[in-house]
Image (spheres, coloured by chain):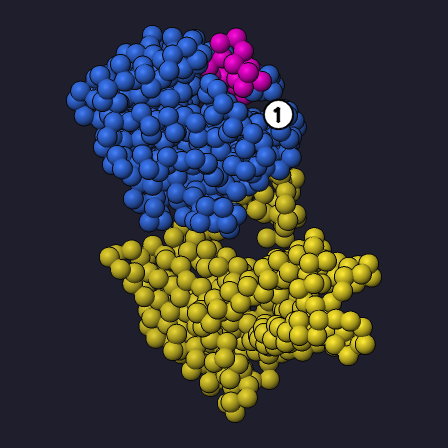
Chain colours: A blue, B yellow
């Protein structure tokens, strides 16, 4: 089959690889119809995530049709149309039963690698490094899905791929970012990053009752999408105005009640701080550049919440712990527990409360995945979200 | 854990066998931590001294009271390089004992050099050289004690590993799975099979180069939903004992499974092969076994990924052939 393979830093190619096989009795094989490139895939593309091997199959946002099931699978049948959540979860461990699917205790065969870096191991993830399991991803014609009874959700035929594909990751991820903010009536929520996850965080914050939602980015086309499609009430282009001044203006000095970091480890900024972090990252003195996170913490009102949904991999420098402690801030974070949100969000899509397809700017055939990565990473042609058609 | 102690008492009999080792080896965490600190201290001392000798040989020579001519500076640099090597070696592990003995050898060499300086007719600061000699003698003593302690732990055989994990089930479920010893190969990576024949069981483990080792074991203790312990019978090629204890975790958090395993490799090639079986880090092996046990109990399977089915690094892409490539 054809599959998108990581061949090294900034080198992604569609190659012919063997078809996936049932490796465990609870596996299913899915013939992928649509799959997307995630902003977090760009961290792999740019070489910021350790433990990648040349030839790894990428992709953790995918959907398709079940073509084979293992002997122990009960909930799925050949022919079912499903969306697959990106964290692999067993559904039976204490974490899964507490709804913390992205820290499933049984789905990372390379748990020992993760323990070395992070102390304990989270769940395995499709196509996202060996530290997170070494699972082949879904930017391919077929994908193997472990614990098939637990993750995949069946999709009724009247909904299109584009409407439901993002249930696999970015819609629940953006929603969880907003949910972590414990939004109350009158709240002002600021969202750093108007990429696809940021767009859904903005839309979700509105759905959850935020009074004002502020989008912060440096690309006008993304800010326009945030205000026209996602429902942002205000936008800040940090290359034009100082984001802290602007947020102070919007909240009359209080600061936003909640701040969402939807940027993660490769954030940008104006001026010397960016050069400082970029240099430290290049010299491997810090693995992640937490510029947006620092700004979110500094901007947040006293006693407010900082919700971190952008991906971080290792260690950050100059973390403003004094601000967090002295100003009674709460930091909430986590890889999205997608399985927890799929059904309720599918319901919202069916009721027309949200149509996640608004973030899609490009459809490409799977063969052109490499072009998709390049467009997305270079923000060419107003690129916001690339969906690959695999069948 | 009381039970494995008694298992080993039973086994050792005369007090000179594994039981004694077992007692000496028993997971004395604080002692091990102290030892690790001492090894670390010596290593950093080596690094600092070595660096000083390499960078400022003249000053070090003056400090210990010898004249710093060209020849001596060269010797000083060589000694400094040796110090750095043993320091790095001790820090990196995994065989700190060898590096510690290297330090002892180096110390003896230093003592010999200082001794020659003391007895030579040349003009030296005798008081300083004597002080340096005394200091090195003290360091030699610490090094020798550390090296002996480090190597005795390995040489006396007896590798003991304690590990635990929490499983999301009631103690009776965990007990049932473990109590049926024939289940063990499903989650213990090195075991090929366990056959139970009445009171006894026959264990077969994978050894390097496609060979296997076998031994016979008996159940020593068996308390319903609480504990299973076993040991190899006398005269087996492998001396081993193990115990697993099941206890409810606090507040309904499942069952805590505490495993205590002990092995002594016989001498010779077979012994080396068995030692290799458990690797430099036997704890990692048992930790993996427990992870798989938890998976087996909680989910009914041990999950593979496209990379994990291969031995060694492999791209995360579907395998050409599954069974053939992996032998599983």
Q: Residues within 10 Å of mark 1 (few under 14, many from 20)?
A: some
Q: Residue at x 50, y 17 (%)?
A: A386
Q: In the displayed structure, does residue A214 sit left or right of residue B54?
A: left
Q: Is residue B14 above or below residue A149?
A: below
Foreground residue, B191 or B15? B15
* Residue A149 visible in the displayed image: no
* Residue B258 visible in the displayed image: yes
Q: Residue at x 80, y 73 (%)?
A: B122
Magenta-colored stretch includes residue B133: no
Q: Is residue A334 above or below residue B15?
A: above
Determine the image quadrant of residue A52: top right
Q: Position of residue B250 (x, y in %)?
A: 26, 60
- Residue furthest toward the bottom? B14
Q: Quadrant of the N terminus of chain A?
A: top right
Q: Position of residue A149 (x, y in %)?
A: 39, 39
Secondary structure, mark 1, is loop
Q: Residue at x 59, y 62 (%)?
A: B45
Foreground residue, A360 or B122? B122
Q: Which residue is mark 1?
A: A10
Q: In the displayed structure, does residue B181 sit left or right of residue B117?
A: left
Magenta-colored stretch includes residue A386: yes
- Residue furthest toward the left? A185
Determine the image quadrant of residue A330: top left
Q: Position of residue B37 (x, y in %)?
A: 51, 65
Foreground residue, A32 or B148? B148
Tag 1 subunit = A
Q: Residue at x 75, y 58 (%)?
A: B77
Q: Position of residue B24 (x, y in %)?
A: 50, 79
Q: In the displayed structure, does residue A183 sit left or right of residue B97?
A: left
Q: In the displayed structure, does residue B287 sit left or right of residue B140?
A: left
For the record, the magenta segment spans A374-391
């Amino acid at each position: 089959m054809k599959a998108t393979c990581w061949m090294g830093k900034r080198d992604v190619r569609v190659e012919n690889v063997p078809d996936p096989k049932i490796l465990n009795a609870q596996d299913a094989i899915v013939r992928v119809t649509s799959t997307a490139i995630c902003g977090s895939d760009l961290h792999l593309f740019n070489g910021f995530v350790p433990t990648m091997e040349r030839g790894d199959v990428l992709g953790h946002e995918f959907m398709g049709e079940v073509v084979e099931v293992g002997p122990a699978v009960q909930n799925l049948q050949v022919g079912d149309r499903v969306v697959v959540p990106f964290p692999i979860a067993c559904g039976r461990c204490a974490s899964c039963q507490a709804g913390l699917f992205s820290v499933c205790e049984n789905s990372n065969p390379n748990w020992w690698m993760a323990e070395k870096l992070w102390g304990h191991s989270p769940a395995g993830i499709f196509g996202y490094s060996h530290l997170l399991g070494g699972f082949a991803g879904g930017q391919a014609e077929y994908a193997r899905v472990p614990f098939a009874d637990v993750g995949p959700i069946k999709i009724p035929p009247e909904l299109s791929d584009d409407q439901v594909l993002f249930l696999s990751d970015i819609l629940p991820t953006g929603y969880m970012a907003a949910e972590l903010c414990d939004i109350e009536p009158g709240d002002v929520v600021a969202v750093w990053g108007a990429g696809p996850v940021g767009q859904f965080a903005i839309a979700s914050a509105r759905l959850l009752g935020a009074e004002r939602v502020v989008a912060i980015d440096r690309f006008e086309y993304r800010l326009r999408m945030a205000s026209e499609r996602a429902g942002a009430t205000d936008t800040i282009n940090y290359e034009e105005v100082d984001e802290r001044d602007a947020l102070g203006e919007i909240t009359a000095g209080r600061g936003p009640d909640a701040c969402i970091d939807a940027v993660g480890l490769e954030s940008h900024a104006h001026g010397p701080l960016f050069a400082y972090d970029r240099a430290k990252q290049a010299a491997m003195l810090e693995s992640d550049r937490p510029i947006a996170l620092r700004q979110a913490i500094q901007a947040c009102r006293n006693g407010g919440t900082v919700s971190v949904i952008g991906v971080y991999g290792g260690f950050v420098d100059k973390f403003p712990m004094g601000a967090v402690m002295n100003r009674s801030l709460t930091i909430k974070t986590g890889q999205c527990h997608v399985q927890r949100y799929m059904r309720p969000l599918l319901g919202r899509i069916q009721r027309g409360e949200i149509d996640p397809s608004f973030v899609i700017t490009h459809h490409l055939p799977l063969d052109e995945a490499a072009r998709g990565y390049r467009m997305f990473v270079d923000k060419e042609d107003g690129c916001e979200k690339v969906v690959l058609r695999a069948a | 854990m009381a039970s494995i102690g008694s298992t080993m008492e039973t086994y050792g009999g005369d007090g000179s066998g594994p039981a004694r080792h077992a007692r000496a080896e028993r997971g004395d965490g604080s002692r091990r931590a102290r030892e690790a600190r001492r090894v670390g201290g010596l290593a950093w001392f080596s690094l600092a001294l070595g660096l000083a000798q390499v960078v400022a040989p003249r000053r070090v020579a003056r400090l210990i009271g010898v004249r710093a001519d060209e020849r001596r500076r060269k010797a000083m640099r060589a000694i400094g390089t040796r110090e750095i090597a043993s320091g790095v070696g001790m820090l990196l592990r995994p065989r700190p004992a060898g590096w510690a003995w290297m330090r002892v050898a180096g110390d003896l060499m230093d003592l010999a050099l200082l001794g020659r300086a003391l007895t030579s007719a040349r003009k030296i600061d005798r008081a300083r050289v004597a002080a340096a000699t005394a200091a090195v003698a003290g360091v030699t003593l610490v090094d020798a004690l550390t090296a002996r302690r480090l190597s005795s732990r390995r040489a006396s055989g007896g590798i003991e590993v304690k590990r635990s994990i929490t499983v999301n089930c009631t103690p009776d479920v965990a007990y049932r799975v473990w109590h049926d010893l024939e289940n063990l190969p499903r989650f213990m990576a090195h075991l090929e099979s366990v056959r139970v024949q009445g009171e006894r069981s026959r264990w077969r483990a994978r050894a390097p180069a496609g060979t296997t080792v076998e031994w016979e074991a008996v159940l020593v203790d068996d308390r319903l939903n609480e504990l299973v312990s076993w040991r190899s019978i006398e005269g087996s090629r492998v001396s081993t004992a193990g115990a697993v204890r099941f206890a409810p975790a606090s507040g309904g958090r499942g069952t805590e499974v505490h495993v205590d395993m002990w092995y002594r490799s016989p001498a010779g090639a077979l012994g080396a092969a068995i030692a290799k079986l458990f690797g430099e880090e036997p704890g990692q092996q048992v930790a993996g076994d427990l992870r798989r046990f938890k998976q087996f109990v909680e989910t009914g399977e041990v999950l593979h990924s496209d990379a994990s089915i291969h031995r060694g690094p492999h791209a995360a892409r579907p395998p050409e052939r599954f069974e053939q490539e992996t032998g599983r």
